[in-house]
Amino acid sequence: MISQEQNDLITRTGPGRPAGEVLRRYWMPAALSDELHGDRPVVPVTLLGERLVLFRDASGQPGLIARHCPHRGADLAFGRCEDGGLRCPFHGWLLDRTGRCLEQPGEPAGSGPARQIRTTSYPVVEKNGILFAYLGPGDPPGFPALDCFRAPATHVFAFKGLWECNWLQALEVGIDPAHASFLHRFLVDEDPGDSYGRQFRDTSAGSTLPMTRVLREYPCPEIRVEETDYGLRLTTLRHMEDGLTHVRVTNQIFPCAICIPMSREMTITQWHVPVDDETCYWYSLFTSFDKPVNRELMREQRLKEHRLPDYAPVRNRSNDYGFDPHEQATLTWTGMGLDINVHDQWAVEGMGPIQDRTREHLGRTDVGIIRYRRLLRTAIRFLAGESDASLPMVGGLDDIVGPACTDVIAPTGTWQDAALTADRERRAGCPWDAPV
């Protein structure tokens, strides 16, 4: 258990809030590139509690500015994208992507210099299908050489989904390896040959056992957590018969991302980004180490479970997440379909908009969650002492690559070597620059 004061400290992310100030020192996903396709590249964005609007100017460069016009507060999400900026339909004021007012066409000539007026604006960078924004002070940090950033666009697919809960409980499900044996338990194993684009359906390296069977039959893992220069490395060991161990290496990338194996071919790098304190988006970059990503198939798979334009899940609280008691008895542990994102969504939304951690009782398998909260509180203390340079993933980015993440079954006595070898072998056959 923690106190209500401690819970507020690590969950609240609006301007001036301690956790929010930590997140503002990092690049945050703001939108998918797909959202700015089409004849009118303008999309409203709420990020860390701030109402903003994202658009491309005439040169194709993205801009992120305050959503309300600095004249009289009209909603720029309905602005006209023209003349090198975004024009407010109310009185025609034109703002560029830096927030500078270029024109006030209804004002008499000589009535005042329009260009002295500025609205809030934030830097934006586009990386493999996601537009990242920096909402903090000073110069933004660089981008580390994560696999999802250094892979070519052909080998990366981006998607996102809306969850109606606080960002922290969304993140914490991704650093909880034990839950997969229960929440994502499948009572019937599918053909791993049909696993493309779906998590926990492939086999592990060194084995023909479907991951669904491994998770189901070995539900009590040993979990080891190490602090790294990017956050945390979690090694989950499921000890099996005949002197074998299933090894799964996953990562927490500070402050709000995870990197996990999806299949032998792909990894998932996923950010959990606050919209406000009670809503968040997950943004995923699926990175292939082998063949180019079948983007059309992966998008089709995910659009069956999400609606546009807000990427909200079709299964949600209003329809009981599609719960089917017959399915729960015969096919899945949850009875909520085959998409594990829905299972996670149910779990974290069911905690309430902001989980009441004054009533929780953590166990030994929650070691990743305990260590992450410690990292976050330490970062908050660093900022309170105005020590940005001490934050993880702010300096020394040149040394951060990968990170390695694998699923492998190996002899118990050599599991460490086997995990490293499986990752190296996958990278050695990669057509892009993937060494770590």
Image (tube, rainbow, N blue to C red):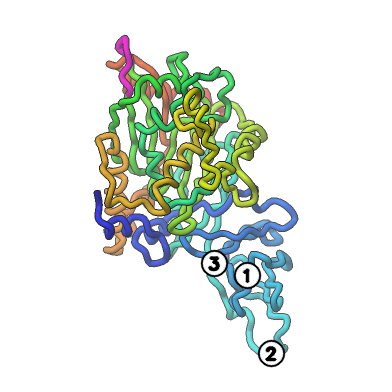
Q: Position of residue 205 (x, y in %)?
A: 44, 19
Left or right of 300 in this view: 210: left
Q: Name the amino acid, label 3.
A: Ser
Q: Nearer the viewer, residue 234 or 213?
A: 213
- Residue occupying the point 31% across, 42% down: 369
- Going by the picture, which residue comes out furthest to the front? 325
- Residue 350 on the magenta span: no
- Crowdedness near tag 3: few (<14), some (14–19) or many (≥20) residues, C-alpha within 10 Å: many
Left or right of 192 in this view: 257: left
Sequence-earlier tag: 3 or 1:
1
Looking at the image, residue 37 lies above or below residue 135: above
Instruction: Read off the residue under disc 1.
Output: 75
Instruction: Read off the residue under disc 2.
Output: 110
The residues colored magenta run 238-244
- Choose mark 2 or mark 3, whichever is in front: 3
Q: CA distance from mark 3 to mark 1?
A: 15 Å
Q: Position of residue 189 (x, y in %)?
A: 50, 19
Instruction: Read off the residue under disc 3.
Output: 121
- Crowdedness near tag 1: few (<14), some (14–19) or many (≥20) residues, C-alpha within 10 Å: some
Sequence-earlier tag: 1 or 2:
1
- Choose mark 1 or mark 2, whichever is in front: 1
Residue 149 visible in the picture: no
- Residue 239 on the magenta span: yes
Sequence-earlier tag: 2 or 3:
2
- Crowdedness near tag 2: few (<14), some (14–19) or many (≥20) residues, C-alpha within 10 Å: few
- Choose mark 3 or mark 1, whichever is in front: 1
